[in-house]
Image (spheres, rainbow, N blue to C red):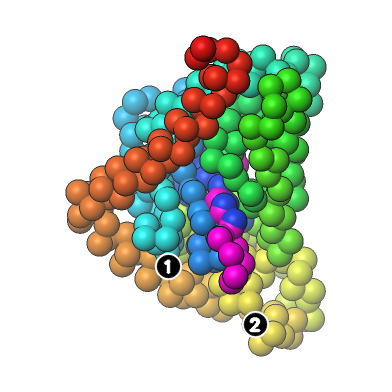
Amino acid sequence: MSSTAIGTSTGPKKRLFSGMQSTGRIHIGNYFGALKQFVDLQDEYECFIFIANIHSLTGLPTKETLVNDTRNLILDYLAAGLDPKKVTIFKQSDVPAHTSLAWIFSNFVTNAYLERAHAFKDAENKKKEVTTGTFIYPVLMAADILLYNSDVVPVGKDQKQHVEYTRDIAGKFNNQYGELFKLPKELILELVETIPGTDGQKMSKSYGNTIPLSATDEEITKAVMSIPTDSRGKDEEKNPDDMVLYQIHKLFNPTVELKAQYTQGLGYGDAKKMLIADIIAFVTPMRERRTVYENDPKLVQEILLQGAMKANEIAMKKLTSVYEAVGLID
Protein backbone atom coordinates (compact mmCIF):
# COMPACT_ATOMS: atom_id res chain seq x y z
CA MET A 1 0.00 0.00 0.00
CA SER A 2 -0.77 -1.50 0.91
CA SER A 3 -2.01 4.89 2.62
CA THR A 4 0.05 14.09 2.88
CA ALA A 5 -0.29 17.91 2.10
CA ILE A 6 0.61 20.99 0.06
CA GLY A 7 3.56 22.14 -2.00
CA THR A 8 4.12 25.54 -3.51
CA SER A 9 6.58 28.22 -2.59
CA THR A 10 3.91 30.93 -2.30
CA GLY A 11 1.10 29.23 -0.39
CA PRO A 12 0.37 26.51 2.12
CA LYS A 13 1.70 23.10 1.30
CA LYS A 14 -0.58 20.43 -0.08
CA ARG A 15 -1.21 17.45 2.16
CA LEU A 16 0.28 14.09 1.26
CA PHE A 17 -0.92 10.89 2.91
CA SER A 18 0.54 7.42 2.67
CA GLY A 19 1.91 4.54 4.68
CA MET A 20 2.98 0.92 4.72
CA GLN A 21 1.75 -2.25 6.38
CA SER A 22 3.73 -3.60 9.31
CA THR A 23 4.15 -7.12 7.96
CA GLY A 24 7.64 -8.55 8.16
CA ARG A 25 10.91 -6.77 7.43
CA ILE A 26 10.66 -4.16 4.72
CA HIS A 27 13.04 -4.66 1.82
CA ILE A 28 14.79 -2.64 -0.83
CA GLY A 29 11.76 -2.99 -3.10
CA ASN A 30 9.62 -1.30 -0.45
CA TYR A 31 12.26 1.39 -0.08
CA PHE A 32 12.70 2.27 -3.76
CA GLY A 33 9.02 1.69 -4.53
CA ALA A 34 7.58 3.84 -1.75
CA LEU A 35 9.65 4.87 1.25
CA LYS A 36 12.26 6.77 -0.75
CA GLN A 37 9.49 8.87 -2.29
CA PHE A 38 8.11 9.71 1.16
CA VAL A 39 11.54 10.95 2.15
CA ASP A 40 12.07 12.87 -1.09
CA LEU A 41 8.67 14.60 -0.84
CA GLN A 42 8.76 15.57 2.83
CA ASP A 43 9.99 19.10 2.09
CA GLU A 44 7.49 19.73 -0.69
CA TYR A 45 4.34 18.48 1.05
CA GLU A 46 2.80 18.43 4.50
CA CYS A 47 3.22 14.71 4.99
CA PHE A 48 1.19 12.30 7.09
CA ILE A 49 2.85 8.87 7.00
CA PHE A 50 1.24 6.12 9.02
CA ILE A 51 2.00 2.57 10.08
CA ALA A 52 -0.94 0.54 8.76
CA ASN A 53 -1.00 -1.98 11.59
CA ILE A 54 -4.78 -2.47 11.50
CA HIS A 55 -4.51 -3.40 7.82
CA SER A 56 -1.83 -5.90 8.88
CA LEU A 57 -4.45 -7.92 10.77
CA THR A 58 -5.70 -9.35 7.46
CA GLY A 59 -2.74 -11.73 7.66
CA LEU A 60 -3.72 -12.86 11.20
CA PRO A 61 -0.27 -12.32 12.72
CA THR A 62 0.44 -13.31 16.32
CA LYS A 63 0.50 -10.54 18.90
CA GLU A 64 4.28 -10.77 19.20
CA THR A 65 4.74 -10.66 15.44
CA LEU A 66 2.57 -7.61 14.96
CA VAL A 67 4.21 -5.74 17.85
CA ASN A 68 7.69 -6.47 16.52
CA ASP A 69 6.82 -5.72 12.90
CA THR A 70 5.23 -2.42 13.91
CA ARG A 71 8.24 -1.43 15.98
CA ASN A 72 10.63 -2.34 13.16
CA LEU A 73 8.66 -0.39 10.56
CA ILE A 74 8.78 2.74 12.72
CA LEU A 75 12.54 2.33 13.01
CA ASP A 76 12.83 1.79 9.26
CA TYR A 77 10.86 4.98 8.59
CA LEU A 78 13.21 6.97 10.77
CA ALA A 79 16.32 5.19 9.54
CA ALA A 80 15.40 5.91 5.91
CA GLY A 81 15.32 9.63 6.65
CA LEU A 82 11.75 10.61 7.51
CA ASP A 83 12.15 13.66 9.73
CA PRO A 84 9.57 13.77 12.57
CA LYS A 85 10.00 17.56 12.63
CA LYS A 86 8.64 17.67 9.07
CA VAL A 87 6.43 14.57 8.90
CA THR A 88 3.53 13.42 11.07
CA ILE A 89 4.28 9.75 11.78
CA PHE A 90 1.66 7.70 13.63
CA LYS A 91 0.18 4.26 14.10
CA GLN A 92 -3.19 3.57 12.52
CA SER A 93 -4.33 1.88 15.74
CA ASP A 94 -3.72 5.08 17.72
CA VAL A 95 -6.49 6.86 15.77
CA PRO A 96 -9.87 5.11 16.35
CA ALA A 97 -11.56 7.34 13.76
CA HIS A 98 -10.11 5.15 10.98
CA THR A 99 -12.26 2.14 11.78
CA SER A 100 -15.28 4.25 12.71
CA LEU A 101 -15.30 6.01 9.36
CA ALA A 102 -14.64 2.75 7.51
CA TRP A 103 -17.87 1.30 8.96
CA ILE A 104 -19.86 4.30 7.74
CA PHE A 105 -18.23 4.07 4.30
CA SER A 106 -19.03 0.34 4.08
CA ASN A 107 -22.66 1.31 3.65
CA PHE A 108 -21.87 3.12 0.41
CA VAL A 109 -20.32 0.20 -1.49
CA THR A 110 -21.67 -3.08 -2.84
CA ASN A 111 -20.12 -6.53 -2.84
CA ALA A 112 -19.91 -6.44 -6.62
CA TYR A 113 -17.93 -3.21 -6.44
CA LEU A 114 -15.45 -4.60 -3.91
CA GLU A 115 -15.02 -7.79 -5.93
CA ARG A 116 -13.24 -5.70 -8.58
CA ALA A 117 -10.52 -4.72 -6.10
CA HIS A 118 -7.01 -5.99 -6.86
CA ALA A 119 -6.51 -7.46 -3.37
CA PHE A 120 -9.68 -9.52 -3.65
CA LYS A 121 -8.91 -10.71 -7.18
CA ASP A 122 -5.35 -11.62 -6.21
CA ALA A 123 -6.57 -13.68 -3.26
CA GLU A 124 -9.15 -15.42 -5.46
CA ASN A 125 -6.60 -16.18 -8.16
CA LYS A 126 -4.37 -17.77 -5.54
CA LYS A 127 -7.33 -19.87 -4.38
CA LYS A 128 -7.18 -18.29 -0.94
CA GLU A 129 -10.19 -18.08 1.31
CA VAL A 130 -11.01 -14.37 1.38
CA THR A 131 -11.71 -12.95 4.83
CA THR A 132 -14.05 -10.03 5.39
CA GLY A 133 -11.04 -7.92 6.36
CA THR A 134 -9.39 -8.51 3.01
CA PHE A 135 -12.67 -7.95 1.21
CA ILE A 136 -13.33 -4.53 2.77
CA TYR A 137 -9.66 -3.49 2.69
CA PRO A 138 -10.35 -0.69 0.14
CA VAL A 139 -13.01 0.79 2.42
CA LEU A 140 -10.63 1.14 5.36
CA MET A 141 -8.01 2.52 2.99
CA ALA A 142 -10.46 5.17 1.81
CA ALA A 143 -11.14 6.13 5.43
CA ASP A 144 -7.40 6.38 6.08
CA ILE A 145 -6.93 8.85 3.27
CA LEU A 146 -10.11 10.90 3.55
CA LEU A 147 -9.88 11.61 7.28
CA TYR A 148 -6.98 13.98 6.66
CA ASN A 149 -8.27 16.10 3.77
CA SER A 150 -5.45 14.62 1.71
CA ASP A 151 -4.57 16.31 -1.55
CA VAL A 152 -2.30 13.64 -2.97
CA VAL A 153 -1.50 9.99 -2.40
CA PRO A 154 1.77 8.72 -3.89
CA VAL A 155 1.26 5.38 -5.64
CA GLY A 156 2.79 3.29 -8.35
CA LYS A 157 0.86 2.80 -11.59
CA ASP A 158 -0.40 -0.60 -10.42
CA GLN A 159 -1.87 0.98 -7.26
CA LYS A 160 -3.89 3.71 -8.91
CA GLN A 161 -7.08 1.78 -8.18
CA HIS A 162 -6.66 2.50 -4.46
CA VAL A 163 -7.11 6.21 -5.04
CA GLU A 164 -9.92 5.66 -7.55
CA TYR A 165 -11.86 3.67 -4.94
CA THR A 166 -11.24 6.42 -2.41
CA ARG A 167 -12.58 9.11 -4.75
CA ASP A 168 -15.62 6.97 -5.62
CA ILE A 169 -16.51 6.46 -1.96
CA ALA A 170 -15.97 10.14 -1.15
CA GLY A 171 -18.13 11.13 -4.11
CA LYS A 172 -20.99 8.85 -3.03
CA PHE A 173 -20.90 10.25 0.48
CA ASN A 174 -20.76 13.85 -0.76
CA ASN A 175 -23.73 13.26 -3.06
CA GLN A 176 -25.77 11.92 -0.16
CA TYR A 177 -24.76 14.25 2.66
CA GLY A 178 -22.94 17.27 1.23
CA GLU A 179 -19.38 18.16 0.31
CA LEU A 180 -17.51 16.93 3.39
CA PHE A 181 -14.65 15.16 1.65
CA LYS A 182 -11.94 16.45 -0.65
CA LEU A 183 -11.31 14.16 -3.62
CA PRO A 184 -7.61 13.27 -3.48
CA LYS A 185 -5.44 12.78 -6.54
CA GLU A 186 -2.95 10.05 -7.13
CA LEU A 187 0.67 11.15 -7.32
CA ILE A 188 1.99 8.65 -9.84
CA LEU A 189 5.62 7.81 -9.28
CA GLU A 190 6.57 7.53 -12.94
CA LEU A 191 10.18 6.59 -12.31
CA VAL A 192 9.37 3.72 -9.98
CA GLU A 193 9.68 0.43 -11.80
CA THR A 194 8.86 -3.04 -10.53
CA ILE A 195 11.79 -4.05 -8.36
CA PRO A 196 12.93 -7.59 -9.17
CA GLY A 197 13.64 -10.03 -6.38
CA THR A 198 16.71 -12.20 -6.11
CA ASP A 199 14.93 -14.89 -8.14
CA GLY A 200 13.80 -12.58 -10.95
CA GLN A 201 10.16 -12.34 -9.85
CA LYS A 202 8.77 -9.15 -8.32
CA MET A 203 10.47 -8.62 -4.98
CA SER A 204 7.96 -9.72 -2.36
CA LYS A 205 8.03 -11.01 1.20
CA SER A 206 5.63 -13.76 0.15
CA TYR A 207 8.14 -15.04 -2.42
CA GLY A 208 11.08 -15.03 0.00
CA ASN A 209 13.21 -13.22 -2.60
CA THR A 210 13.95 -9.98 -0.78
CA ILE A 211 16.96 -8.06 0.45
CA PRO A 212 15.80 -6.53 3.76
CA LEU A 213 16.56 -2.86 4.23
CA SER A 214 17.96 -3.67 7.68
CA ALA A 215 19.93 -6.70 6.50
CA THR A 216 23.33 -7.50 7.97
CA ASP A 217 26.40 -7.71 5.75
CA GLU A 218 26.10 -11.49 5.85
CA GLU A 219 22.43 -11.39 4.82
CA ILE A 220 23.20 -9.00 1.98
CA THR A 221 26.03 -11.21 0.74
CA LYS A 222 23.88 -14.36 0.86
CA ALA A 223 21.00 -12.67 -0.97
CA VAL A 224 23.18 -11.19 -3.72
CA MET A 225 25.08 -14.42 -4.28
CA SER A 226 21.73 -16.20 -4.84
CA ILE A 227 20.78 -13.94 -7.77
CA PRO A 228 20.64 -16.14 -10.90
CA THR A 229 22.94 -15.46 -13.82
CA ASP A 230 23.19 -16.97 -17.28
CA SER A 231 26.08 -18.90 -18.75
CA ARG A 232 27.41 -16.35 -21.19
CA GLY A 233 31.10 -15.69 -21.20
CA LYS A 234 32.74 -12.82 -19.38
CA ASP A 235 33.82 -11.03 -22.55
CA GLU A 236 30.54 -11.48 -24.39
CA GLU A 237 28.42 -8.36 -24.88
CA LYS A 238 25.19 -8.41 -22.91
CA ASN A 239 22.04 -6.29 -22.64
CA PRO A 240 22.14 -5.18 -18.98
CA ASP A 241 18.43 -4.40 -18.90
CA ASP A 242 17.72 -8.12 -19.37
CA MET A 243 19.75 -9.07 -16.29
CA VAL A 244 18.20 -9.32 -12.84
CA LEU A 245 21.60 -8.58 -11.35
CA TYR A 246 21.90 -5.27 -13.19
CA GLN A 247 18.28 -4.28 -12.57
CA ILE A 248 18.99 -4.48 -8.83
CA HIS A 249 22.49 -3.02 -9.10
CA LYS A 250 21.39 0.14 -10.91
CA LEU A 251 19.18 1.07 -7.97
CA PHE A 252 22.31 1.62 -5.92
CA ASN A 253 24.59 2.80 -8.69
CA PRO A 254 22.52 4.45 -11.46
CA THR A 255 25.48 5.56 -13.54
CA VAL A 256 26.27 5.27 -17.23
CA GLU A 257 29.61 3.80 -16.28
CA LEU A 258 28.02 0.87 -14.45
CA LYS A 259 25.80 0.03 -17.41
CA ALA A 260 28.81 0.21 -19.72
CA GLN A 261 30.70 -2.24 -17.53
CA TYR A 262 27.84 -4.72 -17.71
CA THR A 263 27.48 -4.22 -21.46
CA GLN A 264 31.18 -4.80 -22.03
CA GLY A 265 31.24 -8.11 -20.22
CA LEU A 266 31.65 -7.49 -16.50
CA GLY A 267 32.06 -10.90 -14.89
CA TYR A 268 29.18 -12.00 -12.72
CA GLY A 269 31.44 -12.73 -9.75
CA ASP A 270 32.95 -9.26 -9.91
CA ALA A 271 29.53 -7.70 -10.45
CA LYS A 272 28.12 -9.40 -7.37
CA LYS A 273 31.08 -8.25 -5.25
CA MET A 274 30.50 -4.69 -6.48
CA LEU A 275 26.78 -4.90 -5.75
CA ILE A 276 27.39 -6.19 -2.23
CA ALA A 277 29.76 -3.29 -1.58
CA ASP A 278 27.35 -0.76 -3.07
CA ILE A 279 24.41 -2.01 -0.99
CA ILE A 280 26.42 -1.96 2.22
CA ALA A 281 27.66 1.57 1.50
CA PHE A 282 24.10 2.68 0.74
CA VAL A 283 22.49 1.27 3.88
CA THR A 284 25.28 2.15 6.32
CA PRO A 285 23.92 5.66 7.08
CA MET A 286 20.47 4.11 7.59
CA ARG A 287 21.92 1.57 10.00
CA GLU A 288 23.54 4.37 11.98
CA ARG A 289 20.29 6.33 12.24
CA ARG A 290 18.39 3.16 13.13
CA THR A 291 20.82 2.43 15.97
CA VAL A 292 20.30 5.91 17.41
CA TYR A 293 16.53 5.39 17.57
CA GLU A 294 16.80 1.77 18.75
CA ASN A 295 18.88 2.97 21.67
CA ASP A 296 16.36 5.69 22.56
CA PRO A 297 12.91 4.03 22.75
CA LYS A 298 11.53 6.98 24.72
CA LEU A 299 12.29 9.26 21.78
CA VAL A 300 10.46 6.90 19.41
CA GLN A 301 7.49 6.78 21.78
CA GLU A 302 7.44 10.58 21.90
CA ILE A 303 7.50 10.81 18.10
CA LEU A 304 4.53 8.46 17.88
CA LEU A 305 2.69 10.25 20.69
CA GLN A 306 3.09 13.62 19.00
CA GLY A 307 2.06 12.11 15.67
CA ALA A 308 -1.01 10.47 17.19
CA MET A 309 -2.05 13.70 18.90
CA LYS A 310 -1.89 15.67 15.67
CA ALA A 311 -3.55 12.91 13.63
CA ASN A 312 -6.35 12.50 16.18
CA GLU A 313 -7.05 16.21 16.27
CA ILE A 314 -7.62 16.28 12.51
CA ALA A 315 -9.34 12.89 12.27
CA MET A 316 -11.79 13.46 15.11
CA LYS A 317 -12.78 16.84 13.71
CA LYS A 318 -13.58 15.18 10.39
CA LEU A 319 -15.36 12.23 12.01
CA THR A 320 -17.49 14.57 14.11
CA SER A 321 -18.58 16.41 10.97
CA VAL A 322 -19.51 13.06 9.42
CA TYR A 323 -21.51 12.02 12.49
CA GLU A 324 -23.39 15.31 12.34
CA ALA A 325 -24.03 14.95 8.61
CA VAL A 326 -25.47 11.43 8.83
CA GLY A 327 -27.47 12.05 12.00
CA LEU A 328 -25.41 10.20 14.60
CA ILE A 329 -25.10 13.52 16.45
CA ASP A 330 -28.26 15.63 16.57
Q: Quadrant of the rendered structure where residue 34 is?
A: bottom right
Front residue (pair 261, 226): 261
**Left or right: 276, with 289 as reference point:** right
Residue 134 at what x, y percent from top left?
Answer: 61, 23
Which residue is found at the position 38% from the left and 70% from the top? 284
**Left or right: 176, with 204 as reference point:** right
Segment tinted magenta in the rendering: 1-13
Front residue (pair 79, 29): 79
Give the residue at mark 1: 283
Which residue is found at the position 32% from the left and 30% from the top? 64
Front residue (pair 97, 179): 179
Q: Is residue 231 among the parts visible in the rendering? A: yes
Label 1: few (<14), some (14–19) or many (≥20) C-alpha neighbours in 10 Å: some
Q: Which amino acid does label 2 sit on?
A: Thr
Give the residue at mark 2: 255
Is 111 one of the magenta-colored residues?
A: no
Mark 1: which secondary structure? Answer: helix
Majority secondary structure in the magenta region: loop
In the rendered image of this protein, does residue 186 appear above or below residue 285? above
Q: What residue type is labelled 1?
A: Val
Which residue is found at the position 58% from the left and 30% from the top? 143
Query: Residue farthest to the front?
Result: 330
In the rendered image of this protein, does residue 79 appear above or below residue 309? below
**Left or right: 227, with 284 as reference point:** right
